[in-house]
Structures are given as C-alpha cells and as structure tokens.
Amino acid sequence: GTLPDRAIEKGIPAASTLAQMTVDKYVYGLPLHRQLDKYSKMGVRIPASTASNWLMQGWKTIEPLWKLLKEVVLSQKYLQVDETPIKVQDRGHKNNMHKGYMWLYHAPVDRLVLFDYRKNRDRSGPSELLAKFKGVIQTDGFGVYHSLFDQHPSIMLSFCMAHARRKFVEAEKYDQEAARYVVGQMRVLYALESSMREAGLSSEARAKLRQEQAIPILETLGNWLNKNLYAYPPKSPMGEAIAYAHSRWAGLSFYTLHGDMEIDNNLVENAVRPLAVGRKNYLFAGSHDAAHMTAAMYSFMASCKRNGVDEREWLSDIF
C-alpha cells in the first residue's frame, strides 16, 4: 500500500504521530522522555535527541502559520495580556538556567491566543510586539503596562476586576464590614455578566445593559473609594486594596463602554494553565530556540481549545 504522508521531509514520523507527540507535550504536559518510555514498552525505541529534532522540524514546517496567527491577533481592537515565567537552559547564566517570560495575547472576539517568548519581563517585548497595535489592552495592574500606555498613544488600558476583588477579599480579616461591602457590590457586577453570558446577548445588548445596570454600581463604588482613600493606614490590607482600586478605577470601569469586552482577565489567565502544568512536568525549555517553539505550539493548542477544535486532528491536517 501507499505510505502515509510524512510530516518531515525524509523523516520517519507520520503526521499523526508527530501531532500526537506535540499534543501529549503541549496539551497534556507529558514530557518527551515519558512519551518515549511509552513507545519503548511497545517495542519502538526512539532516541530523545531524534524525537526533539522531530518536534523542532515539525515546528519549522508550520512557523509561517504562527506568523500569520500573530498578524491576525495584532489586527484586533481588543486584547487581554498576561505574562508568566519559564525556565530556559542557558550556559551563560548561574546554574545554567535563565528565567525567561511567556507573554500571552488573547483576542476574545476571535478566540485566538498568541504566546510570545521573551528573555525578560521588561517592556521591550510587549512594546515591540504592540508597536502598531491600535485598541484596548486589558491587563492586571503590572507596571510595565502603564509605561506601554505612556509610550503608545494608540493603546487604551483596561484593568482586571478579579485582581481588584482579590485584594478586598484578602482585606476581610482587617475590616470585614468594609471589605464585604465592596466584594458584595462586585458580586452584583459579576452576576450581571453571568446572566448576559447565559442569555447569549449580542455585543450591543451587553453594552446597553452595562450602561443601565453596571455603571450606577461602579459610580457608587468609585465614590466610596474616594471617601475612604485616606481612612486606613496605607500599608494595611484595606489601605492597599483601596489605593490599588482607586488608582485604576477608570481602567476597571472601562469594560462598560464596549459590549465585546470582559470584566476581567480570567480568559487569558485560563490559557496559561497548560503551560503551568508543562512547567511542573518538564521543568524547563532546552534552549531559547526551544522556548520560541514552545510559545508557538502553546499558541496553536490554546487557539484550538478556545474554538472547540480537536488539537490532534488539526495538527495532523496541518503537518
């Protein structure tokens, strides 16, 4: 019979095999050596260096697609951004290990996710990637995004309500009554979001309901923050929670202006989870090149998941 299509020119693995190895690693967090143990028990012995090379070559065949994904994500008008560390093997650093960062860019409207590997957490990575971006960036309160906003006038900043809420939850032990008041008001905001999601409302309908129901609550909360800004010691949990929310209040309320926007950054934070599992299981990327490949593969896998596409079938087709 005819041989199956090869994913790699002159390579041994069929497209389905390479797809399965990729999915096992980047969706299920199964390290390559454990995958190879599994093959070995079935009588197929594959050297680790060979398998690593297959994955790298597989990535090179679909690299143009990653560049296209990047273009599409950056053409959006609304992105959620987050960052998370990743260890990378590098002989030039202490213990031969470098702490790099994965920056995540999630486009909620088209449900696409872009992972971008950078060697550090400073603003150079997002500043370069977002140089031509025009629209809204939704983030946690990390300072890099403020400087990004100052640097690029075409970027508007929106913040994550979940981060602000968390600080008031932590402050409950300090002043239960005040903290519970704020958290209770935020609960009403979240209940509105939940009911709109369940009803499958259009972007226009969501914007209208937020104007009618969310804005009065946010105005009341904003006034409460103004009134209580200096009511607590600045270093106390409540003082810090109020200062955090007060200094970001315009950005925390920004989501009400657009029906497409989310109240928080939870969707992009959910996209980090497979990387967190992988990080625990295979600990580090073998090189900076491998970290770039890892970013691309996580981009594809996360985008498949957000769109309900079977990752293995999609990769088999692409390879």
Image (tube, rainbow, N blue to C red):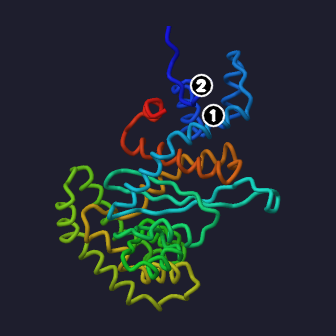
Dot 1 amino acid type? Trp
SS state under label 1? helix
Q: Are marks 1 and 2 in contact (CB under 8 Å)?
A: yes
At x 67% / y 43%, what residue is drawn? 281
At x 38% / y 90%, what residue is drawn? 227
Q: Which residue is mark 1?
A: 54
When the figure is inspected, residue 133 is found, relative to residue 196, above or below; the finding is: below
Q: Position of residue 26 (x, y in %)?
A: 56, 41
Q: Earlier in the sequence, mark 1 or mark 2?
A: 2
When the figure is inspected, residue 288 is found, relative to residue 186, above or below; the finding is: above
The residue most toward the right is 95
Q: Position of residue 64 (x, y in %)?
A: 47, 46
When the figure is inspected, residue 298 is found, relative to residue 3, above or below; the finding is: below
* 203 sits to left or right of 178: left
Identify the disc placed on residue 62.
none
Q: Which residue is mark 2?
A: 13
Please tell me how crowded label 1 is: few (under 14), some (14-19), or many (20+) other residues with Cα within 10 Å: many
* Rendering quarter of residue 313: top left
Q: Position of residue 93 (x, y in %)?
A: 79, 62
Please tell me how crowded label 2 is: few (under 14), some (14-19), or many (20+) other residues with Cα within 10 Å: some
**Label 1 vs label 2: CA separation?**
8 Å
Q: Position of residue 275 (x, y in %)?
A: 57, 49
SS state under label 2? loop
* Rendering quarter of residue 52: top right
Dot 2 amino acid type? Pro
